[in-house]
Image: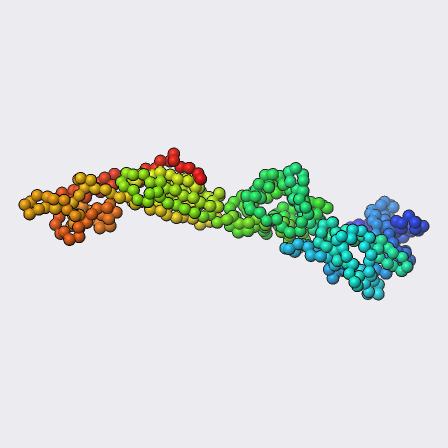
Amino acid sequence: PLSSKVVWARVGSEASENDWKGQNFKPAERSLADILNGRQGRLFIRVFDAESKLLDSIGFRYLRDLREIHLNGKPYSAETILMPPPLGHPPAALQFIGADGTTIQPVITGDKNHATVQEGGNVIVAPHPEADKISFKLLSGTSHIDTAIELPRIWWQMKRDDDKSDGWRDTPWSMQRLEFRRYANERRRIRLRLPPQITSIHVGFDKQLERVYPSKRETVLCLAEFSDYSHIDQRLNTDAWLNVQCGEAIIALIRVFADPVPRINSFSSEPATVSLGEKALLQWATQNSESCLASIEPDIGSVALSGNISVTLTKTTTFMLRLTASGMDDVTTNTTVTVRYQLGKRFFARVKRKDGSFRRGKGFSRGEIRTAGLTHSDAARRSLPIDKRRRSTHQANVDTIRGVDNDASRKRGPTVERHNTTAL
């Protein structure tokens, strides 16, 4: 440690009008207050090792009537850091406590736009990056002592690829995941302005604060270094935060919104009912589906996220449109295309007359439908007319029903004209 090497010290005045050139002393034998002997103002102290090699040198202000400085009601020390809460920095309150416990009323000598002295001596400093350094005159005895206070607040800004910067801020940005990726591709950077007592920071999404950066007066973070995180590289179902940890405190720099929930706005057939062998046009539109894969079942497979496709059907079919993405349940919806079987000359029920000849009947009997191997529901789907009152069964009608069924079953799946697929 530096203190173990210090043998000699020299304290003196920085003011040119002061004729005190300073004095050497051994810190182990005499105190600083003893050497100053009531002197105050702008001073310097330099420390040396046993061989008179300079180890360190700093300037400081000393007021014998000033006991301590309070910042937001607490003693202001070398470890004090003002972390911004979620809504940003509040106004800061400075108070100069005299040796007798009373408040010393300062006079602002620097920028007065962001700091005001209240009655009683408290100084209120606005939450503005240009207000972090404030100059004062403090009355001590019969003279005024010039001094300056630098508030240890944290700020950050975004730098673009053209090296232009947005203004300093103390609240997180909000953006979509794809917007973050675009900024990363544009080589955007976040510049952090940190108090000197912060020596390193940990950065990452949520609690994954894996990247460590040595802290400088201005520390730069490249967004591209975080674009391969799962929070950005994959679909995001809950909000994520790009955080910076300074000691025990965590500051949110960017809020990345969860991806919007994919939706199927519409899925329909035009027309909804076709005759056997006719074409139907399936049409669909989706929303918030950029990270999804779309498919239609049965038999069609992958399709565009929005578009249309022409199909030729041989039977009534229910189609399912499905949106799939990692980390989410599939989004599905159905539409049904009804195939109507039109009966031609050979597709009608015949009924026997009393003389044994046949005439055209109202429909097929239930016995004929059962003998042909169909159920009542099968007959309805094939648009076969049914005569519920007739009980007779004729083989010719059974053969007719089987002919309709064979014609409908010749092709099991829809014929798809994929070249008609379009993206809307």
| Residue 416 against residue 250 in the figure, above or below | above
Q: Is residue 29 visible?
A: no
| Residue at 84 percent of width and 65 percent of height | 100
126 and 289: which is toward the camera: 126
Residue 72 place in picture, x, y as percent: 73, 60
Residue 234 place in picture, x, y as percent: 52, 45
Horizontal side of 25 relative to 331 (left or right) equals: right
208 and 159: which is toward the camera: 159
Q: Can residue 59 be seen in this view?
A: yes
Quadrant position of residue 402: top left
| Residue at 78 percent of width and 51 percent of height | 111
| Residue at 19 percent of width and 49 percent of height | 386
| Residue at 39 percent of width and 40 percent of height | 308
Residue 262 place in picture, x, y as percent: 46, 47
Residue furthest left as drawn: 355
Residue 206 place in picture, x, y as percent: 58, 51
Quadrant position of residue 423: top left
Horizontal side of 401 relative to 283 (left or right) equals: left
Horizontal side of 166 relative to 283 (left or right) equals: right
78 and 218: which is toward the camera: 218
Residue furthest right as drawn: 19
Report the label total.
0
Horizontal side of 358 relative to 66 (left or right) equals: left
